[in-house]
Amino acid sequence: MHISELYKQIYRRFDDVTPLPVDCGKLCDKLCCRGDEESGMYLFPGEERLFINNDHFSVLPTDFKANGRQVQLLVCHGPCSRMDRPLACRIFPLFPLYHKETGLKVILDPRAALCPLTHPEAAPYISPRFIRRVTKVFRLLVKIPEIAAYLEAISDTFSDLEKLKGDIL
């Protein structure tokens, strides 16, 4: 199966499940969908093929590398259809923290501070079904070496950030 087809199948897994049973964008006036020409979402390995030559998005290279491969950033040109979103948007504000030694753990994405759902008082309202779906999908995806390497690289960055936070004071 081609990686593009795999992502399309994965996207469909999120057609019927979201972090809240209502449009969470109403809480924050869709902050996660607003950015500038340099902010966006990292694309998973091979996912950029689905967004090249699409007038609603730009795919930009980043300085971040995973397994020697340059990670691509998807920049939106305004709000898009929910069905057109990349995987990172579909699982937002969660992230699949992964290390080969310790396995997979779904967490609130530390880069998602703008999202009201990342506040401690909001945690009980995030759909358990949504969390289970993200976990199930990524238990499958980490079996793909390129995706596992990508998740480990970002997870290592998150671990480094946590260590730095502890060293600030």
Image: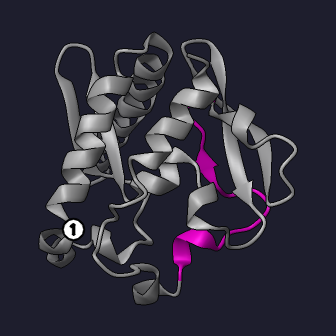
Q: Give above or below for 115 relative to 100.
A: below
Taken as a whole, is the magenta stretch helix, strand or loop? loop
Q: Quadrant of residue 103?
A: top left
Q: Position of residue 128 (x, y in %)?
A: 15, 59
Residue 36 is a magenta residue? yes
Tell whether 64 sits left or right of 115: right
Residue at far left of view = 124
Look at 67% across and 68% down and name the residue there: 80
Magenta-colored span: 30-46
Q: Position of residue 81 (x, y in %)?
A: 63, 67
Q: Secondary structure at mark 1?
A: loop
Q: Which residue is mark 1?
A: 126
Q: Position of residue 24 (x, y in %)?
A: 39, 79
Look at 16% across and 20% down and name the residue there: 102
Q: Quadrant of the N terminus?
A: top right
Look at 26% across and 27% down and name the residue there: 139
Asked if one can make out residue 109 in the rendered structure from this viewpoint, the answer is: no
Q: Given the image, on which type of amino acid does mark 1 rest? A: Ile
Q: Callout 1: 10 Å neighbours few (<14), some, many (20+)?
A: some
Asked if one can make out residue 3 in the rendered structure from this viewpoint, the answer is: yes
